[in-house]
Amino acid sequence: QVQLVESGGGLVKPGGSLRLSCAASGFTFSDYYMSWIRQAPGKGLEWVSYISSSGSTIYYADSVKGRFTISRDNAKNSLYLQMNSLRAEDTAVYYCARVGKMPTIGYYFDYWGQGTLVTVSS
Amino acid sequence: QSVLAQPPSVSGAPGQRVTISCTGSSSNIGARYDVHWYQQLPGTAPKLLIYGNSNRPSGVPDRFSGSKSGTSASLAITGLQAEDEADYYCQSYDSSLSGYVFGTGTKVTVL
């Protein structure tokens, strides 16, 4: 069965950096686009970034552009999010999600990990 | 800042039918981008409920149905059950933002 397991979250000071990882199993990782989505405490969902199956196509939300970098290692079945210049408003649970493959106009996210909490505070 | 508006809460008795609206604009739902729905049970990760406006992934009960018209979409839950108490989010793509957007979220309460 599809499994996505995030790690790397924690407490970091404003301006600091953190690298999140997502270990994928139960499917052919290299065949799928992947995404990061976050949820601030008690708030709604916010799409952060996605990366194509080969890594050649990447998009970011304006709120993280220039500060966050998404990447993947298909040999290790892993997805990453390097977060720099962190701000208090980046505090959230970060979910790794697989992009669905059924033909739709615009992507959707068919499997999600359990999430990892990132807290930005001094 | 969510560009897809949902009612904060809806409620219904067991067995009743409830609907959740998702109102967008000409740069997202009205621009023919599909709408997808997610269910988030308390303390858990979101789960895909409906994709491509009205399609259910395998394992999702047929009590859940979705539709889209113009700049809006709806999720209907028929035969409401206690286990349906959760937050529900719609999602689409916005061409003005060049990114994926989620609705504000709706909490469903079973009375």
Image (cartoon, grey):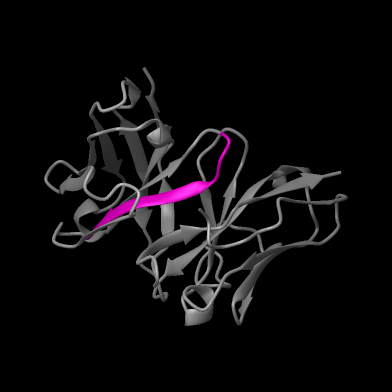
Task: Pick the residue in front: B51 or B3.
Answer: B3
What range is drawn magenta here? A42-52
* Residue extending farthest top: A122
Q: Is residue A57 visible?
A: yes
> In the shown orientation, is residue A39 left or right of residue A29?
right
How many marks on residues? Answer: 0
Residue occupying the point 46% across, 60% down: B101
Figure check: A93 above or below B29: above
Magenta segment includes A45: yes
Figure check: B33 above or below A90: below
Image coordinates for residue B84, horizontal then vertical, percent: 71, 47
> In the shown orientation, is residue B87 left or right of residue B35?
right
Task: Pick the residue in front: A121 or A3.
Answer: A121
Image coordinates for residue A109, horizontal then vertical, percent: 42, 57
Helix, strand or loop: magenta stretch: strand
Q: Is residue A1 visible?
A: no
Figure check: A46 above or below A80: below
Task: Pick the residue in front: A63 or B21.
Answer: A63
